[in-house]
Image (cartoon, rainbow, N blue to C red):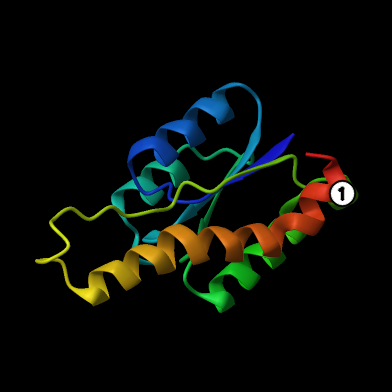
Amino acid sequence: KAVLITGCDKGFGHALAKLLHSKGFTVFAGCLQADKNGDGARELKNMKSDRMQVLQMDVCSDQEVAQAVDFVKRTLKVPEEGLWGLVNNAGISTFGEVEFASLDNYKDVAEINLWGTVRVTKAFLPLIRRAKG
């Protein structure tokens, strides 16, 4: 079964990508820093496994999400079976009192945590439906 995880540069997404891979899943690990050879993306790539596919993915970019969909379609061993799972892990958190946090700060959180999740889900939904995931 194939799973896409966003936010695999570090933390929960990175750990989940390694765990699911160890359990036999094909993992598409979306990393914000893949094109910059970030530490997390590099570590996952260094596994040198055809079941660990690291891809550049900024959940705020329509273009990068569309490129990720194309990459997944091209890379799936049996594309007709689709994508079994999607973990929308990419996100940021910001702390502070409303009075001191900027409006731009709130907009960034919403763009990544809300609209990024919606963007990725809508883009991959046809593949997930195909797999009945």
Lateral position of residue 66 relative to residue 38, left or right:
right
Q: Secondary structure at mark 1?
A: helix
The quarter of the image holding the C terminus is: top right
Which of the 4 image quarters holds residue 105?
bottom left
Name the residue rendered at 84%, 40% in the picture.
Answer: 132
Q: For the view shown, which residue lies furthest in the front direction?
A: 99
Numbered label tally: 1
Lateral position of residue 41 relative to residue 38, left or right:
right
Which of the 4 image quarters holds residue 15?
top left
Q: Is residue 78 above or below residue 122?
A: above
The quarter of the image holding the N terminus is: top right
- Mark 1 is surrounded, within 10 Å at the Cα level, by few (under 14), some (14 to 19) or many (20 or more) other residues, namely some
- Residue named by callout 1: 130
Name the residue rendered at 48%, 60% in the picture.
Answer: 114
User: x, y percentage for residue 42?
Assistant: 37, 49
Q: Amino acid at mark 1?
A: Arg
User: x, y percentage for residue 47?
Assistant: 47, 37
Compare residues 59 and 77 and report the one nearer the observer. 59
User: x, y percentage for residue 99?
Assistant: 11, 66
User: x, y percentage for residue 80?
Assistant: 90, 50
Name the residue rendered at 43%, 52% in the picture.
Answer: 90
Q: Is residue 126 above or below residue 11?
A: below
Q: For the view shown, which residue lies furthest in the left direction?
A: 100
Compare residues 85 and 95 and report the one nearer the observer. 95
